[in-house]
Amino acid sequence: MAGTEAPEDRETTETVAESVNVTQSTVDLVEAELVRMSQSAANEVEADEVDIRQSLVRELEAETATVTAAAVMVVDAGSVGFNQSTVGLARADQVNLGHSAAGAIFTGSANMNDSHANLLVARNVSGGPVHARVLLAGRVDAPVETQLDTPRALAAGLAAGVGVGLVLLLGNLMNRRRR
């Protein structure tokens, strides 16, 4: 497999290859079948398979990604695993979080182990403990600590709808009396 090694401590604009190893570098765009990043920063990474360690990435698009002790703003992947990492937004078929934090996760299946998410939307959630501010899931097989889960979200939405309806009704009745 042909590979490209990004030079250390240098800023690179774009790297495109079959296999790319980025170490102690800053890159704008990396496109490859396989990307390995260590102690680096990238604006965009697009690859079939990605392994990121102690790095920062703004946008990540991959079929399979492993993120360890790193931070990623936006992830779009088939399968992604985070270990001791932070992610802003993750959209993936499968998300695994271990001792990690996420802003928002939209996934078919989430496996969370001692991880936190502000918003978790998934068909299936497993692992534990799962800490989420808002959890919307079809099935949960894990101990969960949440501020707003699916039944509470439905109740809150219903209560808000009734409240707004009453305010509009009262406003309409008051306008009729003034005429």
Image (cartoon, rainbow, N blue to C red):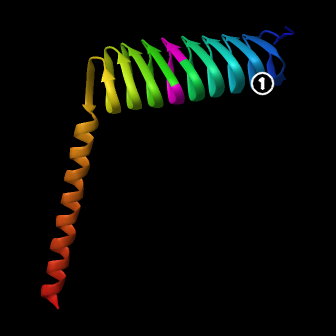
Q: Is residue 118 left or right of residue 1?
A: left
Q: Is residue 122 above or below residue 56?
A: below
Look at the numbered disc 1 and give the secondary structure of its residue.
strand
Q: Main secondary structure of the magenta part?
A: strand
Q: Quadrant of the C terminus?
A: bottom left
Residue on which the image places disc 1: 31
Q: Residue furthest bottom?
A: 179
Give the residue drawn at x 72%, y 22%. 47
| Front position in the image: 124 or 3 | 124
Q: Amino acid at mark 1?
A: Glu
| Front position in the image: 78 or 118 | 78
Which image quadrant is residue 27 in? Answer: top right
- Whether the magenta-drawn stretch holds residue 171 is answered as no
| Front position in the image: 137 or 47 | 137
Determine crowd level at label 1: few under 14, some 14-19, many 20+ residues with C-alpha closer than 10 A: some
Q: Quadrant of the N terminus?
A: top right
Give the residue drawn at x 42%, y 17%. 111
Q: Which residues are magenta?
A: 81-93
Counting from the top left corner in percent of width and height, residue 110 is at: 43, 22
